[in-house]
Image (cartoon, rainbow, N blue to C red):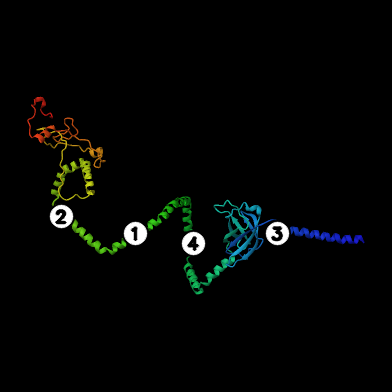
Amino acid sequence: MKSNVVRPLTGLALILVITAIVAVAIGLFRGGFTPTVAVTVISDRAGLVMNPESKVKMRGVQVGTVKSIEQRRDGTAELLLDMDPSQLRLIPSNVLVDIASTTVFGAKFVQLSAPADPSPEPLREGQVLRGDNVTVEVNTVFAQLVDVLDKIDPVKLNETLGAIATAFDGRGEQFGQTLVDFNSLLAEIEPSLPNLARDIEASVPTFGAYADAAPDLMATIRSTIALSNSIVDEQRNLDEFLLSAIGLADVGNEVLGANREALGDVAALLVPTTGLLNTYRESVRCGLGGLVPFTFSPPQIPGILVSAGLTLGVERYRYPGDLPKVAATTGGRDYCKELGLPELPPEFTPPFIVGDVGSNPAQYGNQGILLNSEGLKNWLFGPLDGPPRNTSQVGQPG
């Protein structure tokens, strides 16, 4: 009796063990016992052959699976991904997402790729990514082809194909020879392809410079167009101006031609004067510069102003040593620059420059103002006889 009970229980236990093994194998195959992290991808579309359990790859390594695919109200597709937590730290947060396929008819999978400037922060749970591209599918190509064919008129297509057939009819040998010649041309060009490639690479900075200067070039062209339009609008005035200029040139030619000898003589006579002005150009500049403050000074009071008083005198006049003479020269020396003229600070006295003009107030060493005692006596008491003088005292003050 006991053996009859044990045998069914043993069979039942065996069936349960086999069932558990199969369930565990299925769960392991589907990843049910592997912890995952949810990440969402929003794409314009998911593609035809994108199913749950599709793979999520990065650099050829599977890092997760597609858990579900839903269509949103705006027509986009929402893909919920189950990502491997151990792989998240290796994926940047700004990772690029594409929906790709191995072939045109193959199943889709989610392809992750690192951007040019990867973020230092890793991908985190619950993050929403944007799908960039979806591999072109056969149905898309057929749909676009159907749209194109719907817009083609069969009659016109037949006429076009007939015209092409007529054009090619009987010219096979010529087309063949053309292809042979073109092949020979390509064979001659092929050795120069590396040089052409280098030239193209070298031309990139030039094209970049032209691209940077394009706004300025376009502005120049627009300005040229405006100038051309102005010339066209003012062509009548321009014609009158040119006619007037031609007439003025004719008159000038007559005047200069008739007086060329006189003008040559005048130019020859002006040479000494211009040479003298060139020698003393700095002095002339200084003198004219000294007149500038007068142009900014307030207007003088109308009338005559007289200022009288007693001042200290200088050496009295001596004959014939003080006779006026024009013989001073600087030789073009720039005294203005040396003395700081024409603009001087307040209460500044320039040093006295001795010139050969027939009179020198400082000829006896008196460079400042001195008391003219004889002039004071004559002013107070009238003309008085002076003291006797001998030969050694002639010309001396006193």
Q: For the residue labelled by badge 2, is the local secondary structure a helix, a strand or a loop?
A: helix
Q: Which residue is rendered at x = 83% and y = 59% of the image? A: 13
Q: Which residue is rendered at x = 46% and y = 53% of the image? A: 189
Residue extending furthest front? Answer: 381
Quadrant location, the N terminus: bottom right
Mark 1 or mark 4, which is nearer to you?
1
Q: Position of residue 20 (x, y in %)?
A: 78, 59
- Looking at numbered disc 1 in the image, what kind of residue is underneath it? Ser
| Image position of 55 (left or right of 260) | right
From this view, report whether residue 315 is shown above or below residue 128. Answer: above
Dot 4 corresponds to which residue?
176
Q: For the residue labelled by badge 1, is the local secondary structure a helix, a strand or a loop?
A: helix
- Looking at numbered disc 3 in the image, what kind of residue is underneath it? Arg
Residue 143 picture quarter? bottom right
Dot 2 corresponds to which residue?
254
Crowding at dot 3, Cα within 10 Å, few <14 / some 14-19 / many 20+, comes out as few
Give the mark nearer the N terminus: 3 vs 2.
3
| Image position of 113 (left or right of 301) | right
Give the mark nearer the N terminus: 2 vs 1.
1
Residue at mark 4 to residue at mark 3: CA–CA distance? 60 Å
Most foreground residue, 307 or 23: 307
Q: Position of residue 331 (x, y in %)?
A: 20, 37
Disc ID at residue 223: 1
Give the mark nearer the N terminus: 2 vs 4.
4
Mark 3 or mark 2, which is nearer to you?
3
Disc ID at residue 257: none
